[in-house]
Amino acid sequence: MTDTGLPEGVWRQDRLPTGWRYWVVASRRYSEPDVFRTELNTAIREMVWHPPTGAVLPLWSGLGLQEVMRQGRFRLVAGLGVSATPLEYPEDSHLEAYLERGAEPYWATYSLLGIKQLTPEGWQMTYFLDRGLEIGGVAVDFVHEQRPKGLSMLCALNRHDECPGSFKPRRWLPLDRRVACRCECGCQQRSQGRAADDPVEQLTEDSDDLEPDGKGGTVAHDKPPGAE
């Protein structure tokens, strides 16, 4: 595959059933060799996703994701991912000899981390290779999926247990103007058992912000992009 026509900061793109996977230039040495990319694809497919709030994450991976979230521009986060099994790579000082001459290296164990975000066209999953002392973006998925109408932002993010069963459809409406969430997850029924002082939905992004604009899947970054 040639680089012709690829977005800036991307060295390769692969077709997904309903979208694209973009491989990022900044981590090309860890994804270009076929054996590495095959293992990354497997790790992505088998990644374990956790809710973004109150997630029970492995300690080191959780700290890494917190740092990525702190430094990045991530909004409307639906999940945090950690590879189900570690990835084995040659240590950096052995990498070139392994690739060029097949020399037996010392092996290092890395993890793949992920952040799943809601976009106007569906979902964006950004993947990071955690190499212990450094975490770098390695790939980005853009997956097209039609979002049902009439959902609270929390249900749209698949954070169903957090949804209070209703939501404020516009930021400028009075605080008491809420409408029932149409999700079939049972959030309306669960809301009837909530106490009056239970917290309600704190996400204030207007659903109109998520109307499809035809720009989903644009990559123009040296790193995996956060949502623009």
Image (cartoon, rainbow, N blue to C red):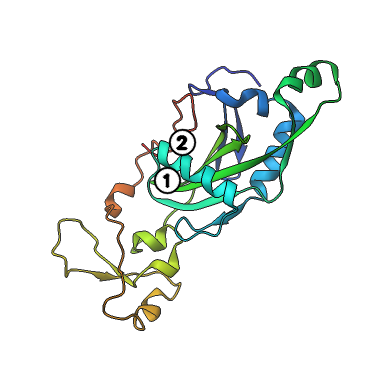
Q: Is residue 194 above or below residue 1?
A: below
Identity of the residue drawn at 56% across and 39% down: 127
Local crowd size for mark 1, using a 10 Å CA cut-off: few (<14), some (14–19), many (≥20)? many
Identity of the residue drawn at 68% across and 25% down: 32
Q: Tell me which amino acid carries mark 2.
A: Gly
Asked where in the image residue 97 lies, by quadrant, the reply is top right
Q: Is residue 72 above or below residue 150?
A: above
Identity of the residue drawn at 39% across and 81% down: 189
On the rendered image, what quadrant is the N terminus found in? Answer: top right
Residue 205 location (% of width, % of height): 28, 52
Mark 1 falls on what kind of element? loop
Return the residue at label 2.
217
For the residues marked 1 and 2, what is the alpha-carbon distance in whole angstroms?
8 Å
Q: Which mark is residue 175?
A: none
Residue 120 location (% of width, % of height): 38, 46
> Which of 169 and 134 lies nearest the eye of the viewer?
134
Local crowd size for mark 2, using a 10 Å CA cut-off: few (<14), some (14–19), many (≥20)? many
Residue 148 visible in image? no
Identity of the residue drawn at 40% across and 67% down: 162
Residue 6 visible in image? yes
Q: Are marks 1 and 2 in contact (CB under 8 Å)?
A: yes
Q: Earlier in the sequence, mark 1 or mark 2?
A: 1
Q: Which mark is residue 121?
A: 1
On the rendered image, what quadrant is the C terminus found in? Answer: top left
